[in-house]
């Protein structure tokens, strides 16, 4: 195609609507997904416990997650933290298609389990 000034123009490239633009998922959205994933794993909380929360740093499509939670005690803390790590990686990957390179689990507080039939 030639213009009146003699320049040659290329025809406009047609880009399918599904291929246009970009998607950026805010760090706080990924953090909410990670916190919810942690809640799904640890189950019901003691009544004075704070719900899990997370902070996330996303860089070039990969995430580093820090999950802060409280657990009941006695329990297998290492196994529960490993389960939280696995589930966070799985849920973030499935819901936002993002690789999670690191999940650091911070146990902020331990709550003693309620004893049944305690003599008083």
Image (cartoon, helix red, strand yellow):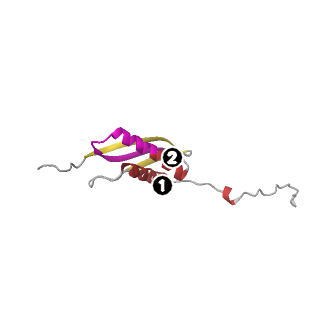
Residue drawn at 72 percent across, 57 percent down = 15
Identify residue for label 1: 29
Q: Which residues are magenta?
A: 64-86
Residue drawn at 23 percent across, 49 percent down = 114
Q: Which of the pair 26/45 is nearer the observer? A: 45
Q: Quadrant of residue 80?
A: top left
Residue drawn at 71 percent across, 58 percent down = 16
Q: Is label 1 in a helix, a strand or a loop?
A: helix
Does the segment drawn in magenta span residue 117? no
Q: Which of the pair 4/19 is nearer the observer? A: 19
Residues marked 2 and 1 touching at CB (< 8 Å):
no
* First of labels 2, 1 by sequence position: 1
Q: Quadrant of residue 17?
A: bottom right
Give the percent coordinates (x, y) of residue 45. 31, 52
Q: Residue furthest front?
A: 117
Q: Residue furthest top?
A: 78
Label 1 environment density (alpha carbons within 10 Å; few <14, some 14–19, many ≥20): some
Q: Which of the pair 115/81 is nearer the observer? A: 115
Give the percent coordinates (x, y) of residue 57. 48, 46
The quadrant in which the N terminus is found is: bottom right
Identify residue for label 2: 58
Query: Can you tell which mark lies on residue 60?
Result: none
Q: Is label 2 in a helix, a strand or a loop?
A: strand
Label 2 environment density (alpha carbons within 10 Å; few <14, some 14–19, many ≥20): some
Distance between the alpha carbons at the discs numbered 2 and 1: 11 Å
Q: Quadrant of residue 14?
A: bottom right
Residue drawn at 56 percent across, 53 percent down = 24
Give the percent coordinates (x, y) of residue 46. 28, 52
Q: Which of the pair 40/32 is nearer the observer? A: 40
């Amino acid at each position: 195609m030639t213009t009146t000034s003699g320049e040659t123009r290329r025809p406009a490239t047609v880009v399918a609507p599904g291929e246009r633009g970009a998607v950026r998922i805010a760090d706080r959205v990924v953090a909410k997904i990670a916190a919810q994933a942690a809640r799904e794993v640890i189950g019901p909380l003691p009544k004075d416990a704070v719900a899990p929360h997370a902070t996330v740093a996303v860089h070039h499509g990969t995430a580093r997650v820090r999950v802060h939670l409280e657990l009941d005690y006695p329990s297998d803390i290492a196994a529960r933290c490993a389960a939280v790590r696995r589930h966070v990686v799985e849920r973030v990957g499935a819901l936002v298609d993002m690789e999670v390179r690191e999940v650091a689990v911070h146990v902020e507080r331990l709550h003693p389990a309620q004893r049944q039939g305690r003599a008083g």
